[in-house]
Image (tube, rainbow, N blue to C red):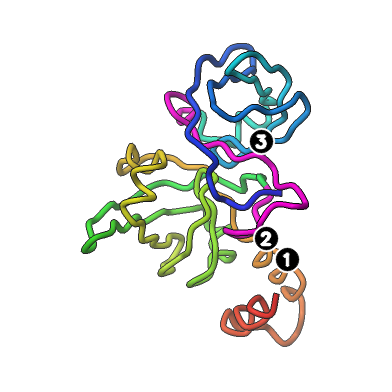
Amino acid sequence: MFTGLIRELAEVLSFNNNFLTLKAKYKPKIGDSIAVNGACLTVVRVSTGTFTVELSLESQKILAMENYRGKVHIEPAMMMKDRFEGHIVQGHVDCLGIVTSIKQNGNSTDYIISLPKEYSKYIIPKGSVTIDGVSLTVNEVFTNSFRLTIIPHTIENTIFKRYKVGTRVNLETDMFARYIYNMFKNKENKLSWDEVDNIMARY
């Protein structure tokens, strides 16, 4: 489990034969789980100042692999004693989103992200979403897209600063939204998203 709060920007040194080697200040152990751009991966090799994770072919089909170059987001899995911030992130990328608009909005920047229709039902106004491993709040929901408002600090300290219109991103929807939707999707009395939001607020 993760929180969506990035530990650091690691540097990609190589990606060969399904093995991704990163240079980072963080020092994991072999077997540790670490989210790289939001995807939970296992550390298979450790060296001085570097570590290596392995990506299955299945993972490579799902992820925006073009973003696994230069700098990438990394976050180690939570430990029981860690302070919980952000939101509950599994490190299981649901789908790819696409940046369709980037506009300045006062002292922040609005990003519109489109996503496949079958996942849009899990995007809730003022709910949580994870983009390339970053925990964010959904400000507005449209048909098969949503708006994020990103402050300068977040842009400067993430790979958001290199996003352009057309950039693909790893997207994980909110776990509670998925669970609640599937719990009630076959019920005669359908819940509104306002009711779902009230249920989620109790946890």
> Which quarter of the rendered picture does the C terminus lie within?
bottom right
Q: Amino acid at mark 2?
A: Met
Q: Mark 2 or mark 3, which has the lower sequence index?
A: 3
Characterize the magenta stretch by its predominant secondary structure.
loop
Q: Is residue 148 above or below residue 30?
A: below
Check whether the beta carbons of the residues at disc 1 and disc 3 lie within 8 A of each other.
Answer: no
Where residue 152 appears, x then y in whole percent?
31, 52
The mark found on residue 97 in the picture is none
Label 2: which secondary element = helix
Bounds of the magenta segment: 66-90
Where residue 8 appears, x then y in whole percent?
50, 37
Does residue 68 show up magenta in the picture?
yes
Marks 2 and 3, how far apart at CA: 18 Å
Q: Amino acid at mark 1?
A: Tyr
Q: Amino acid at mark 3?
A: Ile
Label 3: which secondary element = strand
Disc 1 marks which residue? 179
Check whether the beta carbons of the residues at disc 1 and disc 2 lie within 8 A of each other.
Answer: yes
Disc 2 marks which residue? 175
Quarter of the image where one finds residue 151: bottom left
Going 46% across and 65% down the picture, which residue do you hit?
138
Disc 3 marks which residue? 34
Going 42% across and 46% down the picture, which residue do you hit?
98
